[in-house]
Amino acid sequence: MVALRKPNGPLSRRRPMPPKRELYRERCQDEYGNHYIVIVWRDWPGLSMTSYTLKDGMPVRYEDESRFSLPSGKILTRCED
């Protein structure tokens, strides 16, 4: 039998995960003209890993330079400014 930690000893403390940082927002629309805001997040400080959500927190998948997709399959296109 192997003990993983000393009984009644101090628990090892994990460093808290750094919070995501918002990089920017993209105005998008679906095929019916409904508008959405896609938020681009940096997941880890110092790395180029990004994730995408709507303003309400729903995850969004990056498709290409002009499109995102929702879990429902709906495609969002970036709006021209």
Image (cartoon, rainbow, N blue to C red):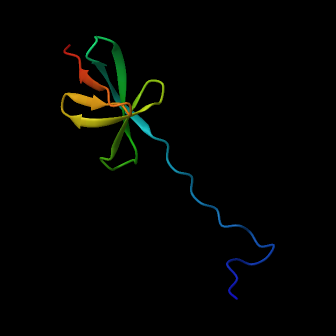
30 is higher (above) or lower (below) than 68: above
Residue at left 25%, top 16%? 31
62 is higher (above) or lower (below) than 56: below
Q: Locate residue 81, reporting x and y percent.
A: 20, 13
* In the image, farthest residue toward the right: 8
Residue at left 32%, top 26%? 74
* In the image, farthest residue toward the front: 72
Report how many numbered discs are placed on residues in the image. Answer: 0
In the rendered image, which quarter is residue 21 located in? top left
* In the image, farthest residue toward the bottom: 1
* In the image, farthest residue toward the top: 33
Q: Locate residue 62, reporting x and y percent.
A: 28, 36
17 is higher (above) or lower (below) than 12: above
In the rendered image, which quarter is residue 77 located in? top left
In the rendered image, which quarter is residue 29 located in? top left
Q: Is residue 6 left or right of residue 50?
A: right
Q: Locate residue 55, reporting x and y percent.
A: 44, 24
Residue at left 39%, top 47%? 45
**Nearest to the observer: residue 70 or residue 22:** 70
Q: Quadrant of the N terminus?
A: bottom right
**Nearest to the observer: residue 31 or residue 65:** 31
Residue at left 40%, top 48%? 44
**Nearest to the observer: residue 8 or residue 26:** 26
Q: Locate residue 18, reporting x and y percent.
A: 49, 47
